[in-house]
Image (cartoon, rainbow, N blue to C red):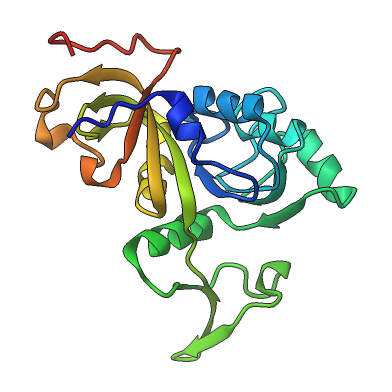
Amino acid sequence: MEKVTAIETVLKRIEKGAVLMIGGFLGVGTPENLVDGLVEKGVKDLTIIGNDSAFTDKGIGKLVVNRQVKKLIVSHIGTNPETGRQMNAGEIEVELVPQGTLAERIRSGGAGLGGVLTPTGIGTVVENGKKKIEIEGKEYLLELPLRAEVALIKAYRADTKGNLVFKYSSRNFNPLMATAADYVVVEAEHLVPAGEIDPNEVMLPGIFVDAIVFSQTGDAAVKGGI
C-alpha cells in the first residue's frame, strides 16, 4: 500500500488542542513544509513535544511566534527569545526536560513502557512533583512516557511503503517520535519506489509510517514513473 499523501489531507487531521510531536534539532531535520501548513491553517492550543523551540523564523518557533502553542515539552528554549517572553508573561506553558530524559520518555511511549528511572535531575527543580524511587541506596526519578496524537517527522529518503533513511543529526529525534504517535507523517526530501532502499540502510521501517508528503526543499525525485 502506497502512503504518499497530499499535505492538505494530513493537515485536516490536526485540530485545535491536538498533541503533536515535531522532529528536528534546532530546526535541522524539521518538516518545515508541514509546519508552514500548520501556520497557514492557524490551528490553536497545540501541545508540542520536540527537542527545542528552534528560532523565531524556523521550525517549531514559527508556531510559537504565531501564538498557536498552548504548551511546549522541550529540552531548551534558549535560541528562541519569543518562547521565553511568552513563558515569562504566562502566555504559554513550558515543561523543560533534560534532553536525554526527553528522548527516553519518548522511547518509553513508543515501546509501551510505564516510564523510565533516571538519576538526572535529582536535587534540582527537575524533581519537583515527581515520584522518587530508591534502588540499592540510590535515588531515581520516575519519568513518565510521552505519546502524541500525530508525529510530524522529516526524512532524507523514503520509499512509497514508508521505509526511511535519515541524514546526520536529523536522526536524533525523528525515528523515536515515529514510534510514539497514533498517526505518523513523514516529509521526505527524496522518494523512490518500494524496494529501492537497501534493507540494511533502512533506519525506520515503514510499519511506523502512515503518510508521506513531498518536501519542497529537496528534489523529491521519484524514479520508475511513480
The quarter of the picture where residue 160 lies is: top left
Residue 90 or 184: which is nearer the viewer?
184
Q: Position of residue 30 (x, y in %)?
A: 50, 30
Residue 38 in sight here = yes
Residue found at x 67% / y 56%:
96
Whether residue 138 sits left or right of residue 95 in the image: it is left
Q: Is residue 70 shown above or below 190?
A: below
Residue 205 in sight here = no
Q: Position of residue 28 (x, y in %)?
A: 50, 28
Q: Position of residue 104 (x, y in %)?
A: 44, 60
Q: Is residue 151 shown above or below 224?
A: below
Q: How many marks?
A: 0
Q: Quadrant of the N terminus?
A: top left
Residue found at x 24% / y 34%:
162
Q: Quadrant of the C terminus?
A: top left
Residue found at x 87% / y 52%:
90
The furthest residue to the right: 89
Whether residue 195 sits left or right of residue 161 in the image: it is left
Q: Is residue 160 shown above or below 120?
A: above
Q: Position of residue 24 (x, y in %)?
A: 50, 35
Whether residue 7 sits left or right of residue 226 in the image: it is right
Residue found at x 39% / y 36%:
185
